[in-house]
Amino acid sequence: MNYRAFFELQREPFCADIAHKEILVTAGLKGVEDRIRYAIRLGSIALITGEIGSGKSTALRYVAGLFHPSEYRVINITASSGSILELYRQILNELGIDMTGISRAVMTRQIKQEILELVLGKKMKAVLVIDEASLLRLDVFAELHTLTQFESDSKPFLPVVLAGQANLIDNLRYRNSMPLASRIVGKCHLQGVNKKGMEEYLAHHLSIAGMERNIFEEAAMTAIHQGSGGLFRKANHLARGAIIVAAKHKSAMVSSEHVRIAATEIF
Ligand SMILES: Nc1ncnc2c1ncn2[C@@H]1O[C@H](COP(=O)(O)OP(=O)(O)OP(=O)(O)O)[C@@H](O)[C@H]1O
Ligand SMILES: [Mg+2]
């Protein structure tokens, strides 16, 4: 009998592809929402950093999902280490603009025109969300500042959300990044959750998989919390791995020993 049948789980537990309504609204997530709403109101920049697997991308998805598409145009980009042209291409692609054979100057003009049309024409709020922004090259930060400046009007039409690992902050301290960095009005850093936060997280993911009772012994939850440093992705791997080990041993409860065995398989 496999582990899902053994624990009568309706779906793969602790999976990555959870629906918007299944996202656990943590204090960290609320903090991200507040910063993003504030930056949008001011037409400025919000900076979201966090450890690997702490839930940054999920937080961005959560907040974007709160914005009604009739009112907001969220331009979602996952950054690469490419040049500014690559970033422009991604933005144009998201905006659904055909860009075959157009030059760099035309690209920026097209993007700005589209933003002005959204904001002034359609009376919408546009926001550029760049995940993995810690990968962006330094020269791209300087260009990005130019892109978000609208000469015709001093009003900032394109608020930006930058999310990435902590070195994003170091990259923003360089001289070339300063104009962009000076527009940051809200920062938050997602950390590992505390023990209580982890217990809630584990119960939440169990219930997503259709399990309403707790199958983790107290010591197992402590082991997952310590082993993951409170970080969600690592906790997923440990929890799922421990469930598999427990099922193999035909144990109705997951123990700290099961977590220990699972930990030997993950990085
Ligand atoms: N609020 C949440 N509710 C439920 N599950 C979550 C939440 N946040 C994160 N997770 C889980 O943790 C996993 C990792 O989260 P996510 O990919 O958002 O982290 P990240 O910080 O963007 O990671 P990376 O540093 O690799 O970009 C998700 O796939 C999801 O399973
Ligand atoms: Mg991510």
Image (spheres, rainbow, N blue to C red):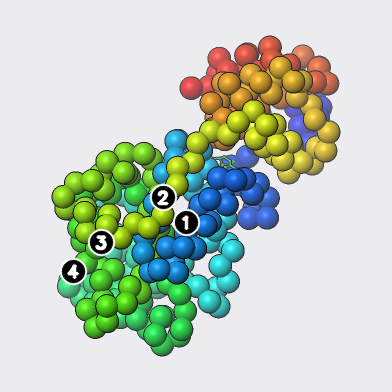
**Residue type, mark 4 in image:** Arg
**The N terminus appears in which quarter of the rendering?**
top right
* Circle 4: element type: helix
For marks 3 and 1, give the one nearer the viewer.
Answer: 1
* Circle 3: element type: helix
- Which residue was labeled with disc 1? 35
Q: What's the CA distance linking mark 3 and mark 4?
A: 13 Å
Q: Quadrant of residue 145?
A: bottom left
Q: What's the CA distance linking mark 4 and mark 2?
A: 31 Å
Q: At 34% across and 57% down in the image, what residue appears?
A: 184
- Which residue was labeled with disc 2? 187
Is 96 situated above or below 174?
below
**Residue type, mark 1 in image:** Arg
- Residue 50, labelled with which disc? none
> In the rendering, at what x and y percent does residue 146 appear?
21, 67
- Which residue was labeled with disc 4? 104
For marks 2 and 3, give the one nearer the viewer.
Answer: 2
> In the rendering, at what x and y percent does residue 236 appear?
61, 32
